[in-house]
Image: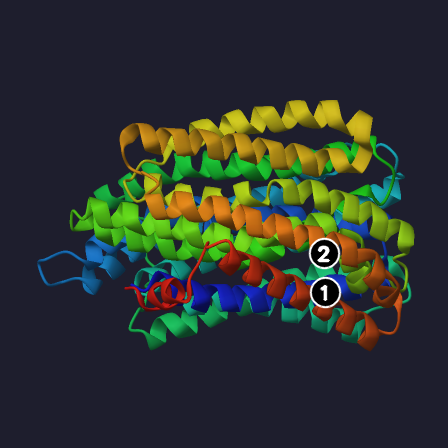
Amino acid sequence: MNLTRALGSVGGLTLASRVLGLVRDSLFARFVGAGFASDAFLVAFRLPNMFRALFAEGAFSAAFIPMFNRKVADPDGRGLVDGIAFADDALSVLLPVLLTMTALIELAAWPVTWLLWGSAQGVSHAQFGYVVALNRITFPYLLLISLVSLLGGILNSLGKFWVNAAAPILLNLTLIAALLIFHRHDPLGTARNQAIAVTASGALQLAWLVQNCRANGVHLRLKAPRLSPDTRRLLALVWPAALGTGAVQVNLVISTALARALLPAGSVSYIYFADRLNQLPLGLIGIGLGTVLLPTISRQLGRGAEDEAIETQNRGMELALLLTLPATVALITCGVPIIAALFQHGRFDAAGSLATAQSLAAFSVGLPSYILVKVLTPGFYARSDTRTPVRYAMQSMVVNLVLNLVLIPTIGHVGPPLATALSSTVNVALLYRELRRRGHFVPDAQLRRRAARLTGAALLMGAVLWLLADRFAPYTTGPNLQRWAALLMLVALGSLVYAAAAFALGAFRLADVRRLVSRS
């Protein structure tokens, strides 16, 4: 497996999805702005997003992919047949659970919304009923996206990474189409149409995965639930992983609820828009690396190649730092012109840009940690250890809660993003220490050398961007063509400075780049 090329495939499609997501958010900011309607939709969208991260990018994949890979690699020659039989059994148990859970959540929509919204204080009975209605519309997405995660895990195990990586593009295209075709002068009506589009996109993503599974010879059958020994083991692995991944998502829910309850209207939207930009490098690098590393390390460990697995993780961390450090520095130093270029028009004003940029800087402090979690956890999951990451994630959740309670009264809407960043850093430190203690990860000389020099290159780039940010600011609030040209030029200049600094400091040589691209 060529790690760099596989990351390029997944990361490229994820980047396309994130760029479309920015287009969607820019349109949403124009038509809805930052206020009650936007807060209501974003809270309703929180639970579907949480389940996507929980299943598609977290617990289910962490437990299912290593087991499916072992079935496919079984030396008895049955390979894919045994793997599909295992997937059939998993589906037979997963589908009834999802149907029951969706029905229960629909019935309990009022208390669930109360938890997500952070009580009903500050809004009228009719307004809170509107939030409940939006949640009911988006809840079925949970069922659809969980089935998508099962089919995506199968295709990832077969090396068809691009299919699953392309699925979120359908979500963004559906929401963009709804904004362009069905937006209304009333922000409440536009937000309701967005909620409908979320569930419609789940059906489209499921159809896309089903079609591609069939094209690759995977035909799952609906049958009566069967708790086979393998299914029992899968469930035993899923629940700890779900608790661990869920702890991270609970952090976000807690932050959103506290922001809604303790901060002025619009604060949830500032945090959301900042997180969307923060998710751009996270999606490109972190999710891409996590998607590729788990099946790759699982296969290497399956054949007893422990040294190869450690080498793969070293190169994964190297790639993560190469791409993450400049993104971190750029988002901190150039937040205001970036936010203004993307969102400052229509109902979204300069005050909203400044508040969002402040939240973005706080989120970006933890960007390396968010991505390194995706690099380190496959070292546990590939060895069927889903419990250790849970323990550390739960500890980080407590840290996040305490920091939120301390920071929100002191620094307002910047508090939740900063609490999330610092708690994620604690999580990474604990995961890294445990892998080192077990001997499952040892940073080699190449990684140590490059990490220090890449940090220096990113800081040099940051100094240049800091000097340029004010010069570009006036152009980022002009006509659309002008603001996009200014933003692209700022990104291009930063990339050139970073590349030049990285080579000047010896972080990379041309021969290293050629070897990295060709390594398999």
Residue 68, horizontal then vertical, whole percent: 27, 54
Q: Is residue 294 visible?
A: yes
Q: Secondary structure under badge 2?
A: helix
Q: Nearer the viewer, residue 400 or 502?
A: 502
Horizontal placement of 95 versus 90: left or right?
A: right
Q: Can residue 118 be seen in this view?
A: no
Location of residue 47 with respect to 503 vertically, above or below: above
Residue 218, horizontal then vertical, whole percent: 31, 69
Horizontal placement of 131 versus 519: left or right?
A: right
Q: Which of 485 and 181 is in front in this view?
A: 485
Q: Which of marks 2 and 1 is nearer the N terminus?
A: 2
Q: Which residue is the site of mark 1?
A: 490
Q: Which image quadrant is residue 176 in?
A: bottom right
Residue 447, horizontal then vertical, whole percent: 39, 46
Horizontal placement of 317 versus 346: left or right?
A: left
Q: Residue at x 48, y 35 (%)?
A: 428
Residue 466, horizontal then vertical, whole percent: 75, 52
Residue type (three-letter) at the residue carrying disc 1? Leu
Q: Nearer the viewer, residue 344 or 474?
A: 474
Q: Which residue is the site of mark 2?
A: 465
Query: Residue most toward the front?
Result: 504
Q: Secondary structure under badge 1?
A: helix
- CB-based contact (under 8 Å), mark 2 and mark 1: yes
Look at the image and tell me in which quarter the C terminus lies. Answer: bottom left
Horizontal placement of 490 versus 128: left or right?
A: left
Cα distance between the residues tagged 2 and 1: 8 Å
Look at the image and tell me in which quarter the N terminus lies. Answer: bottom left
Q: Which image quadrant is residue 122 in?
A: top right
Query: Residue most toward the left?
Result: 76
Residue type (three-letter) at the residue carrying disc 2? Leu
Location of residue 74 with respect to 422 vertically, above or below: below
